[in-house]
Image (spheres, helix red, strand yellow):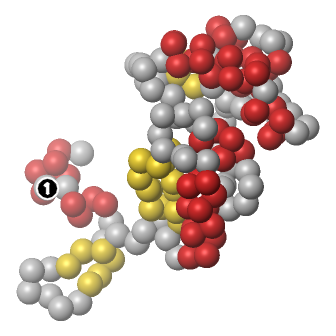
Amino acid sequence: GLKNNIGYSNLVKGLCTYEEAIRESGIPGLSLLTTGPLPPNPAEFLSSKANIEVLEKLKGMFDYIIYDTSPCTFISDSQIVATYVDGMIMTVTCKQTKRNSLKFALYAMKTVNAPLMGYVLNKLPMTKRGYYSKYYYYSSYSSYTDEDSRKKK
């Protein structure tokens, strides 16, 4: 994994430069900025003027910024961040996220007028149904590729 000793929190506190905190991913056009050391009061940190200034500078440096936050199942960082971003995508885990937790998270985002763009459903079992089959069965991702591409490997 990536070292997290220098990151976003260091930028907000003025302890490093953008060049020191932002890392190249090895994928052209994709940069990474880890959180850095966690501040003692994340809500206060995220609401600070210094944080807003860093967010604005980053918006000027990049076309898109993906900001990964803690779960929004209670009053959280997500609600604060929602007020500064252009859009949010909520991640839900199949057969794990409780319906009431999701309802509360949606309500919490609505109270701050979060710009919800969509959802990601994680850990959804992939099923495949044959043309004449009345039964579903589990299959791997590779079964969705054509026969020729599998032979070339």
Q: How many marks?
A: 1
Quarter of the figure that contains the N terminus: top right
> Mark 1 Cα within 10 Å, few/some/many (few <14, many 20+)?
few
Q: Which quadrant of the view contains residue 33?
A: top right
> Residue at 61% of width from left, 48% of height from top?
112
The residue singled out by tag 1 in the image is 146
Secondary structure beneath label 1:
loop
The x, y position of residue 152, in whole percent, is: 17, 45
Name the side, left or right, on which 152 lies relative to 31. left
90 w.r.t. 43: above or below? below
| Amino acid tagged 1 | Asp
The x, y position of residue 10, in whole percent, is: 79, 20
> Residue at 72% of width from left, 45% of height from top?
77
> Residue at 68% of width from left, 23% of height from top?
52
The x, y position of residue 62, in whole percent, is: 48, 17
Residue at the right extreme, as displayed: 40
Name the side, left or right, on which 72 lies relative to 13. left
Q: Nearest the camera: 92 or 84?
A: 84
36 w.r.t. 128: above or below? above
Name the side, left or right, on which 151 lies relative to 82. left
Q: Nearest the camera: 149 or 60?
A: 60
Question: Can residue 51 be seen here?
Answer: yes
Quarter of the figure that contains the C terminus: top left
The x, y position of residue 5, in whole percent, is: 80, 25
Residue at the bottom extreme, as displayed: 134
Name the side, left or right, on which 35 lies relative to 41. left
